[in-house]
Image (cartoon, rainbow, N blue to C red):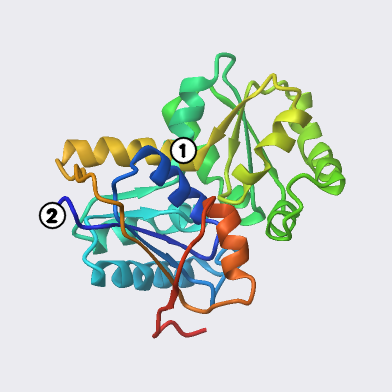
Amino acid sequence: MTAKPIGVFDSGIGGLTVVHALMQRLPHENIVYFGDTARVPYGPKSPQVIREYAAQDTDFLLSKDVKMIVIACNTVSGVALDVVMKQAHVPVVGVIRPGAAAAVAASKKKRIGVIGTVATINSKAYTNAIRQLDAEAHVVAQACPLFVPLVEEGWTHHKVTELVAKEYLFPLKLEKIDTLVLGCTHYPLLKEVIARVVNGNVTLIDSGEATAMEVERILDEHRLRNRSALKPHLQFFVSDVPAKFAEVGERFLGQKMGRIHRAHGFLL
């Protein structure tokens, strides 16, 4: 049972930063990743469709005999966590709750910023999760729609990216936040730029890292942690293979991906 893989899914490629965080924290765990690249992005779609996609993504991972499921997609974590938890017979973790908990724990002034895609910010998932944990927290949310294409273009250290970051983060600086949640799986690749723009006075919360910590806790609680010293087996599945997937994916993952498998049966 302990040697079974952790299943991770996302609407596309961004969830690989969560896989990277898992690999750093749990270096002996086998992992199966599924990116629904044929139907990305999920954000603009209706909640009903997102919930249907989440159910299909869950079925796929369960077919790989996973011991746990990590929802690396912020949109699914906010809209369809209950769908995945009901359908799966294994422990399930989304990225929002761990990120919110880490922010509440880190913030000394209770002034927390959240950045994410338009869909994630409009869902208020992070804001609600933070306020459930601390009703006195002052939460400021800001959509940063240009960050995703800039990251996928590889412009993580480009002057244009810094200018865009200054524009997006200015309202948050005015609110004197002391903690900032990176509420999109693409954003960890912009940590250096974001830290520079906020002048290093703000604690950055990587939801992927917070999620990896929660996964570790749950594995230990259920005695599912893989104690093997063997090299872990990593498998990558996508519903479509864009031309740049491997190139971009390796930037997100921080290493070579090897073979990328096509998962069939996912219709547009």
Front residue of 220 and 260: 260
Report helix, strand or loop for mark 2: loop
When the figure is inspected, residue 254 is found, relative to residue 41, above or below; the finding is above
**Which quarter of the picture shows residue 221?**
top left
First reached walking from the N terminus: tag 2 or tag 1: 2
Front residue of 139 and 77: 77
Q: Residue at x 66, y 54 (%)?
A: 118
Q: Residue at x 64, y 52 (%)?
A: 117
Numbered label attached to residue 1: 2
When the figure is inspected, residue 44 is found, relative to residue 109, above or below; the finding is below
**Which quarter of the picture shows residue 197?**
top right
Numbered label attached to residue 209: 1
Measure the alpha-carbon separation of dots 2 and 1. Answer: 24 Å
Report helix, strand or loop for mark 1: helix
Q: Residue at x 53, y 65 (%)?
A: 12
Residue 95 image position (x, y, % from top left): 44, 46
**64 relative position to 266: left or right:** left
**116 relative position to 36: left or right:** right
Residue 85 in view (yes/no): yes
CB atoms of marks 2 and 1 within 8 Å: no
User: Which amino acid type is shown beneath numbered disc 2?
Assistant: Met
Q: Residues within 10 Å of mark 2 (few under 14, many from 20)?
A: few
